[in-house]
Amino acid sequence: MNEPTDWALGYAQQANANFRAWELYEQHPEAVAAECHKLLFLQMACEKLCKAHLIRGGTPVEVLQSSHGYVAKQLPTVIKRQIILMRQNLNGMQGVLTPVRHLAEEIDVLNPSVRRDGRRPDNCEYPWEAGGQVVSPLNWSFHPLRLCNVPAGRTFIKLLREAIDRIIDELEH
Amino acid sequence: MPTKEEEAMTLAQKHYQIEAGLTQIFRITGSAEVELRPLEPIKLLEVNENTVPSGIMPIQFGPSPASGLYYPSIILEVTPDEFQRIQNQELKLPNGWKVGDLIPRPSTEQGQ
């Protein structure tokens, strides 16, 4: 039977691969067929990173294998730790963490199973109905893409990369 | 190298400094025997007005000596309502953990 550490590493490595796909789309925008694809990789990377930390914290893998919606709650704590590790001077870091919390909530609802009691059917995988019409993710303007392009969002993306690298390093050694 | 107690204080104060919605941070304690183990993580219960309710879901981080964090740590973030439910024992902490001492907000940070 595998240890929780093995599972946590597996999730972290998958987060790394998902985020690498996001990074490649950033570097090669001509390869992006639709922006919802790009966001799908960001959402999956964040979810698996959070699940890796939850497994380390004692949540049974079986619980996490069939459930979603951990990003809004856990990702800000993961990013907060990364800020503390990387920044000696924490002045002004509230200005990063507050938008990160908002961004994490928006990334969470990109998952089609996270609907916030039906208030947020928008997601980056499947069409949904709104105002009597079928809406496709292909034509939707996603809030997180805009948020990732403001200064705090760019800092978030950098911290996310560092957080993924760090957990893999910790679990491999 | 700081003691686990000292590092818990430092970590909590940094969290207060960068997280606007944090109202209280408590130590979480296990049994005396467990807490004496050198590798037993620092455990913090953080009451945050800005988080979303999701029950008891602790997450763990490894130590990072290069950044001055010598012990593993576990963070359990809850909403004020969830904290009340922990106090009322409607929500249970895992592993026999108990809510320990409040780590106060640093006084130099109160005016920010």
Image: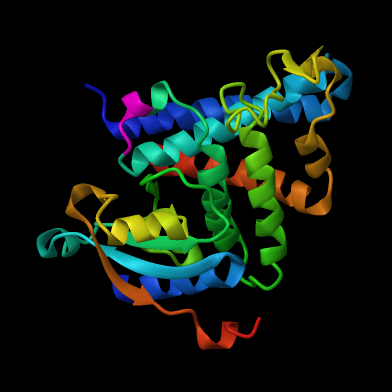
State left or right for residue A131 relative to residue B89: right
State left or right for residue B16 relative to residue A6: right
Q: Position of residue A24 (x, y in %)?
A: 75, 26
Q: Residue at x 36, y 36 (%)?
A: A55
Residue furthest left in the image: B33
Q: Residue at x 32, y 24 (%)?
A: A62
Q: Position of residue A150 (x, y in %)?
A: 84, 49
Which quadrant holds residue B10?
A: bottom left
Quadrant the N terminus of chain A occupies: top left
Residue furthest right in the image: A30
Q: Residue at x 78, y 25 (%)?
A: A25
The relative height of residue B61 versus residue B69 in the rendered view (above or below) is: above
Confirm whether the magenta stretch covers residue A172.
no
Residue furthest front in the image: A132
Magenta segment boundaries in residue numbering = A59-63
- Please tell me whether the stretch drawn in magenta is mainly helix, strand or loop: helix
